């Protein structure tokens, strides 16, 4: 067996014009940066490590595919794809040579750069992250389960999308649909998974009053239900076995998490499969032994998911996708048995992409880009199409795999608001009624108590509270109208008089911020940051930016800080826009997802790896790095002077930097699993923290069918 993996000490591999980063699985020629699919990365590493030899097809089968037989066409396609990726204006020379009837060889000279070339600080940070990640799986499993459910159901305004896909001129067609209740049990229905033969639906029913979680398998034809209850455990479906006879689920008691498989009638004992230190959100058994699923915690980032293929007999698994670090990663959607393909969603900042790939990770193909999430998807064999429902715009999509294009967009009229859906055909879908309410509450920092609701809004509103020092509470709300007509209202609550004033109605594609004095607002479009008065009438200034916006904030002196990912880059860049000189200056911090200003020379960043970094612009270096608590829903931060407030989605912590940067955070609020925190904002005028909360209530399951004319 020939070597196929680099030593852990190798941080870069240089060949020709390219530089390979083994840990990030990217190549860069100084101008172009490309991510490698797992299979292509393995082939490239194998060729480099054995460059003195001619690599035969059998070598590739034995050491890369690790199988007894691989079709010649699969090898040809993989090598061809790798050659295309290794071509660039800077790399015209041949990299991989074919030897007729013998195999392949790697031509360029190779230089290995080991970790000794890195700074001591970088090595210590990496080791600390690795140790922390290893310990997390053994420590108490944090109760962030419900919070992660909500993050997959509620659309958050985290950035501005930049769409590249074309809809081929497909127009939206209006059709009427009717609902039939399939289940209206007391509790919240969530996490649905349809059996491959489409005869049974498994889901979780949560009864928060009794802290009971019930796994229910419902036969759709007869309505018969089988129940699985494990007292003291939260229990959710992962997916089905390929033969419809077994259900894979995961459970947690607040300390440990395990994955089990059980007979679909819940007869007999469940069989343990493996521990899950991070939540396996969704998956499916693709044969008798293998499970493809989404696994969180990729690259030591809690919110980042990757597709994994796991052998349930040996416990071995390998990744079949390579999500960008500056994204939320990849979510399993469907396995197409006849094609031996996997469909998944890659959630970027502000938009999502639909992909299809082989079960080994090869031949990854981008299908479609959408501004809204694709939570669930169904492959319809008869139509050879992918079907999914956009629960923001209430549109049912049909994408043809044979024609590689979008066929139809149907606006469903006369239906409820849904959280999760699963289309069976263009004429019938299964749907869970939306079970969430959004409120803005206040935490009084004099006694750390959560007040009664300050602002209550309809469940389909988007909430983004903004605080000003004059006592006004700015927030964003509005109904989810369809398409381009969807608008939100910028409103302000005067707590003294308990009156709400509407400032303006604004377009959907935005990220909004209000200055502390309440005089200015940032409105982010797809091309610029616009600085307005809070009535959004007078445009004071505009910052033109090329790329996808990740975050923006008002800094000291009302300068503007913003983070953007360039069109041809996989990393984020941070800028400060000086209002006086009207120029943007880039800060030497990469891969940040949020930042604000502590003082005239110091900035605080949240990195994609869930770390806080204090950057001193005078010293031009990071002077302190702090670990955040593992995220339970999403990170929210609010800075005011030396006080940094952080929420992990359930709890709220205070970092008082007046006591030093290494002071441990203080827990100022402990939440509950039935409510999650979407955003926080501190108001010094009333010494209170305002939080955007999502809470749950009972809902129903519907079968939704198109009304025949």
Image: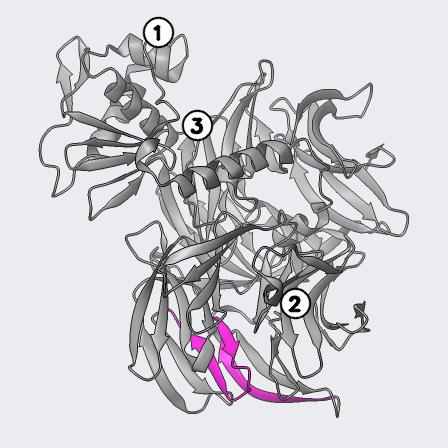
Pick the residue in front: 701 or 82.
Answer: 82
- Above or below 328: residue 531: below
Marks 2 and 3 sit apart, C-alpha to C-alpha, by 38 Å
Question: Would you say residue 55 sits in the magenta stretch?
Answer: no
Mark 2 surroundings within 10 Å by alpha-carbon count, few (fewer than 14), some (14 through 19), many (20 or more): many
Q: Position of residue 383 (x, y in %)?
A: 47, 40
Whether the residues at callouts 2 and 1 have beta carbons within 8 Å, the answer is no
Pick the residue in front: 185 or 636.
Answer: 636
Whether residue 201 appears in this view of the structure is: no
Name the front one of labels 2 and 1: 1
Image quadrant of residue 255?
A: top right
Q: Position of residue 617 (x, y in %)?
A: 37, 65
Q: Position of residue 326 (x, y in %)?
A: 43, 50
Marks 1 and 3 sit apart, C-alpha to C-alpha, by 31 Å
Question: Would you say residue 515 sits in the magenta stretch?
Answer: yes
Quadrant of the rendering where the C terminus is positioned = bottom right
Q: Which residues are magenta?
A: 499-526
- Residue located beneath label 1 in the image: 1
Q: Main secondary structure of the magenta part?
A: strand
Pick the residue in front: 391 or 118.
Answer: 118
Marks 2 and 1 sit apart, C-alpha to C-alpha, by 57 Å
- Residue located beneath label 2 in the image: 460
Q: Secondary structure at mark 3?
A: loop
């Amino acid at each position: 067996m020939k070597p196929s993996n680099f030593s852990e000490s190798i941080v870069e591999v240089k060949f020709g014009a390219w530089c390979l980063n083994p840990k990030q699985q990217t190549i860069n020629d100084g101008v172009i940066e490309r991510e490698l699919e797992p299979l292509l990365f393995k082939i490239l590493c194998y060729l480099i490590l054995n460059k003195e030899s001619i690599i035969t097809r059998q070598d590739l089968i034995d050491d890369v595919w690790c199988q007894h037989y691989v079709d010649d066409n699969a090898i040809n396609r993989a090598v061809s794809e790798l050659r295309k990726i290794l071509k660039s204006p800077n790399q015209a020379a041949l990299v991989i040579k074919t030897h007729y009837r013998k195999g392949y060889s790697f031509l360029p000279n190779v230089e290995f750069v080991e970790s000794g070339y890195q700074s001591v600080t970088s090595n210590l940070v990496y080791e600390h992250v690795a140790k922390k990640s290893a310990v997390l799986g053994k420590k108490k499993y944090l109760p962030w389960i419900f919070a992660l459910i909500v993050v997959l159901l509620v659309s958050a305004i985290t950035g501005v999308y930049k769409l590249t896909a074309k809809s081929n001129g497909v127009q939206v067609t209006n059709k009427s649909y009717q609902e039939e209740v399939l289940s209206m049990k007391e509790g919240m229905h969530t996490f649905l998974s349809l059996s491959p033969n489409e005869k049974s639906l498994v889901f979780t029913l949560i009864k928060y009053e009794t802290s009971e979680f019930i796994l229910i398998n419902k036969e759709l034809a007869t309505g018969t239900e089988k129940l699985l209850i494990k007292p003291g455990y939260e229990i959710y479906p992962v997916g089905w076995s390929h033969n419809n006879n077994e259900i894979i689920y995961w459970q947690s008691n607040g300390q440990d998490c395990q994955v089990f498989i059980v007979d679909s009638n819940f007869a007999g004992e469940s069989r343990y499969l493996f521990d899950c230190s991070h939540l396996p959100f969704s998956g499916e058994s693709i044969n008798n032994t293998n499970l493809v699923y989404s696994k969180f915690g990729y690259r030591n980032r809690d919110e980042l998911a990757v597709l994994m293929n796991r052998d349930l007999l040996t416990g071995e698994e390998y990744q079949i996708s390579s999500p960008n670090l500056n994204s939320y990663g990849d979510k399993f959607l469907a396995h197409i048995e006849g094609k031996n393909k996997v469909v998944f969603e890659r959630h970027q900042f502000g938009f999502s992409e639909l992909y299809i790939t082989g079960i080994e990770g090869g031949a990854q193909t981008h299908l479609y880009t959408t501004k809204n999430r694709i939570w669930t998807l169904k492959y319809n064999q008869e139509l050879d199409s992918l079907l999914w429902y956009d629960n923001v715009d209430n549109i049912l999509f049909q994408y043809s795999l044979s024609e590689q294009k979008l066929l139809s967009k149907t606006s469903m009229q006369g239906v409820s608001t849904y959280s999760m859906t699963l289309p069976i055909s263009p004429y019938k879908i299964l749907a869970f009624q939306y079970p969430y309410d959004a409120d803005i509450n206040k935490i009084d920092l004099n006694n750390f108590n959560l007040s009664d609701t300050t602002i209550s809004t309809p469940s389909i509103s988007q909430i983004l509270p903004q605080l000003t020092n004059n006592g006004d509470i700015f927030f964003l709300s509005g109904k989810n109208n369809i398409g381009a007509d969807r608008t939100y209202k910028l409103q302000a609550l005067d707590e003294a008089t308990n009156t709400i004033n509407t400032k303006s109605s604004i377009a959907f594609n935005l990220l909004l911020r209000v200055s502390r004095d309440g005089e200015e607002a940032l409105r982010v479009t797809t091309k610029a940051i616009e600085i307005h008065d809070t009535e959004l009438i007078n445009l004071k200034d505009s910052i033109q930016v090329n790329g996808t916006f990740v975050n923006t904030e008002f800094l000291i002196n009302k300068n503007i800080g913003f983070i953007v990912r360039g069109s041809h880059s996989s990393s984020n860049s941070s800028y400060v826009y000086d209002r006086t000189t009207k120029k943007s200056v880039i800060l030497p911090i990469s891969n940040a997802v949020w930042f604000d200003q502590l003082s005239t020379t110091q900035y605080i960043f949240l990195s994609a790896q869930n770390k806080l970094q204090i950057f001193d612009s005078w010293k031009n270096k990071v002077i302190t790095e702090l670990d955040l608590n593992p995220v339970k829903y999403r990170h929210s931060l609010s800075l005011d002077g030396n006080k940094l407030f952080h929420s992990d989605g359930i709890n709220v912590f205070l970092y008082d930097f007046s006591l030093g940067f290494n002071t441990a955070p203080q827990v100022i609020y402990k939440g509950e699993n039935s409510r999650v925190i979407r955003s926080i904002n501190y108001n010094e005028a009333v010494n209170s923290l305002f939080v955007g909360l999502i809470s749950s209530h009972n809902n129903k399951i519907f079968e939704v069918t198109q009304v025949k004319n």
